[in-house]
Image (cartoon, rainbow, N blue to C red):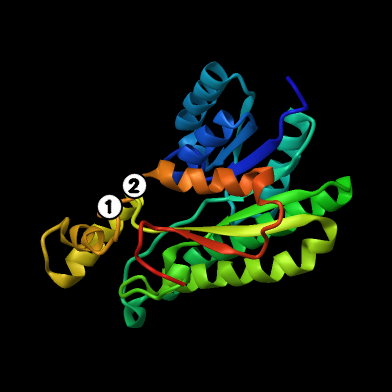
Amino acid sequence: MSISRPAVLISGAAQGIGRAIAVQLATDGMNVAIADLPFQEAKALELKLELESKYGVHAIWVELDVASREQTKAAIEATERAFGRFDIIVNNAGIAQVDSVVNHTEEAARKIYDINVLGTLWGIQEAAKKFKANKTPGKIICACSIASHKGMPYLGVYSSTKFAVKGLVQAAAQELATDKITVNGYCPGIVLTPMWDLIDRKICEASGEPVGTALKKSIEGIALGRGQEPEDVAGLVSFLASDKSNYITGQAIVSDGGIVYP
């Protein structure tokens, strides 16, 4: 194992956008800690083998429920032990819920805030503590969304969590700048993943339209005329994880093909 390679911890990395980010950062030459929930272990181990065999990097599987501060801290420690260093965290894990604002239940609201908001907060806090303790610069990269720039029908509570994440990014960037720690967010649009299949189905159930209608209408509103692939998002994260982004902090950068124009 080469400790000359940067080491990154990615939450929610076993599938979807997180998986694409892991592949891209391995392509960039980074050692990767694949963090996800226990039921994703088989997918994570398959990804680990792919990263090591195809890209010549080292990878580990780390069990992580981002709603747990202690598990977040342990995942960072495991990353540093495995690779001899810890340079970047990608707070990618998150969930979507589809319901009207007036019908959203307390249980559902608490769950999505625990994962999307507190999960991101714990990632920021524990990564910052580790960077400070090591007296090293670091990069904290957080999943926002176009929903952090524009509240959307049936995604109101989800949107509010992403507005909250954007606020954390902006505040943490200012607080951590003197420690040479940058904090940024990436804002995907209509990404063709199982999460958007769920969003489409739920919106169509609420509107009484056939399944697929909501996704079709959303894609028709994209300037570039196609749905977003996970690899499109991974390209932006690759930039934010690289030295090319060293003078960027506190930003929630949109990659949506032309939907919102903040």
Q: Nearer the viewer, residue 232 or 14?
A: 232
Q: Which residue is drawn at 52% across and 51% down?
A: 93
At mark 1, the secondary structure is helix
Determine the residue positioned at 33% across, 56% down. 190
Q: In this view, does 29 lie above or below 116?
A: above
Extreme residue toward the bottom, this view: 102
Dividing the picture into quadrants, the one containing residue 218 is bottom left
What kind of residue is marked 1? Asp
Which residue in the protein does label 2 denote? Answer: 193
Residue 124's image quarter? bottom right
From this viewpoint, is residue 107 visible?
no
Count of numbered tags: 2
| Marks 2/1: CA–CA distance | 7 Å
Query: What x and y, as percent, mark residue 26?
Result: 57, 30
Establish if 46 lies above or below 33: above
Residue nearer the viewer, 151 or 101: 151
Secondary structure of the residue carrying tag 2 is: loop
Q: In this view, does 126 lie to the left or right of 254?
A: right
Task: Return the x and y of residue 105 as percentages of the image width and height.
Answer: 39, 75
Q: Is residue 155 left or right of residue 226?
A: right
| Quadrant hosting residue 75 | top right
Camera sees residue 172: yes
Q: Mark 1 points at which residue?
A: 197
Compared across the picture, whether 148 is left or right of 140 comes to left
Is 132 situated above or below 4? below
- Do the residues bearing badges 2 and 1 touch, measured as CB atoms within 8 Å? yes
Q: Which amino acid does label 2 sit on?
A: Thr
- Quadrant containing the N terminus in the rendered view: top right
The image position of residue 184, as x and y in percent, is 62, 59
Residue drawn 42% across the image and 45% down it: 232
Front residue (pair 150, 102): 150
For disc 1, the neighbor class at 10 Å (few under 14, some 14 to 19, many from 20) is some
